[in-house]
Amino acid sequence: MNATVDLKRRLGSLGLGVLVLGVVYGLAVFISTDARLEYAIGAILLFCGTMWMGAKSKGNWLSAALLAAPLIVVFGFLVLPKWPVLWPHLLFWLITAMIGSHLLGAGRPRRILSISGAGVLVAASVWYCMGYVPQQMARSRSHFRDASAPAFTFRPVSDGPVPTTPAPGKVLVIDFFATTCAPCIAELPELAGVRGDLQDKADIEFVVVASDVGGDTPERFRSFAQRRHVTLPLAYDSGGKAHTAFGLTGVPALVVLDRTGRVRFTHEGYNASEMNFRRDLVRFLKTL
């Protein structure tokens, strides 16, 4: 009888863990790509879930581990290969589950220890979200360099002046983009803000570039920009030739060419946790 009850509780913990996973990934897909928000929601749900399960199973470690397992395993396989600097997500989530499982279900000594651990975890989480994540996410994707650029010519998509190739004496900021890419869309307001901050710098040009590699066509790209009220110049990279020539592997991908046409900066990927993305890019462009 006890074995049957234990099995049901463990299956219940695993099922609840799958639900937590669904909520966290639904948030990431439909609401925000911010890694900090993803971490915080995951931690809150794990804490509440393991605290509830712990009260029923008297602080069972295995139930807590099973509840946290779906989120930890899926995040480890799907997200860490792209963002390895986020490995503390896994550690903090596991610690959160263990603390939650003993907050209500354990005896008084362990409960006091769990409350103290929860306080330390909250403090560590604040540092992690406000200090570590923004800095590491920006550092892992930003690359300063001084290299020759491949020859390329884009096809204009939007009306008005569109930089289709580097112009001597001008800085060119290229944003390789796809209309189906959520991080690309999330990055657009930041890039528009950078352009606004540098509106008095006529020698710094911007262009957002789509290609058929991501399934876009010039017409689809133009229609997307009209619906989203995108005011940045738009261009098209047929066959993704320029994207490949720059050695880029995905989108969004930012490339900055200096006044002599040399590659000075690249930034692949985007996450809303990069709090200083706009400020840092503006500062860098002003130095060229």
Image: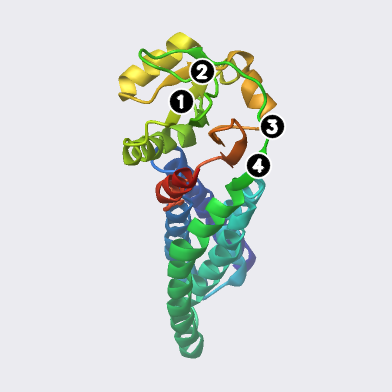
Which circle, 2 or 1, is nearer the viewer? Answer: 2
Determine whether label 2 and label 1 are within 8 Å by CB: yes
Find the residue positioned furthest to the bottom: 109
Q: Which label was assigned to residue 146?
A: 4
Q: Which label was assigned to residue 247?
A: 3
> Which residue corresponds to mark 2?
164
Disc on the earlier residue, 3 or 2: 2
Relative to 31, 182 lies left or right: right
> Which residue corresponds to mark 1?
207
Q: Secondary structure at mark 4?
A: strand
Q: Crowdedness of circle 1 by 10 Å Cα count: few (<14), some, many (20+)?
A: many
Which circle, 1 or 3, is nearer the viewer? Answer: 1
Which circle, 4 or 1, is nearer the viewer? Answer: 4
Disc on the earlier residue, 3 or 4: 4
Which circle, 3 or 4, is nearer the viewer? Answer: 4
Which circle, 3 or 2, is nearer the viewer? Answer: 2
* Residue type (three-letter) at the residue carrying disc 1: Val
* Residue type (three-letter) at the residue carrying disc 2: Thr
Q: Secondary structure at mark 2?
A: loop
Residue at 37% across, 36% down: 201
Residue at 39% across, 14% down: 158
Instruction: Report the label total.
Output: 4
Residue 3 in view (yes/no): yes
Residue at 51% across, 27% down: 177
> Compared with residue 120, is residue 175 higher up or lower down, i.e. above or below?
above
**Distance of mark 4 from mark 1, alpha carbons?**
21 Å
- The percent coordinates of residue 148 (x first, y second) are 68, 33
Disc on the earlier residue, 4 or 2: 4
**Distance of mark 1 from mark 3, alpha carbons?**
18 Å
User: The N terminus is located in which quarter?
Assistant: bottom right
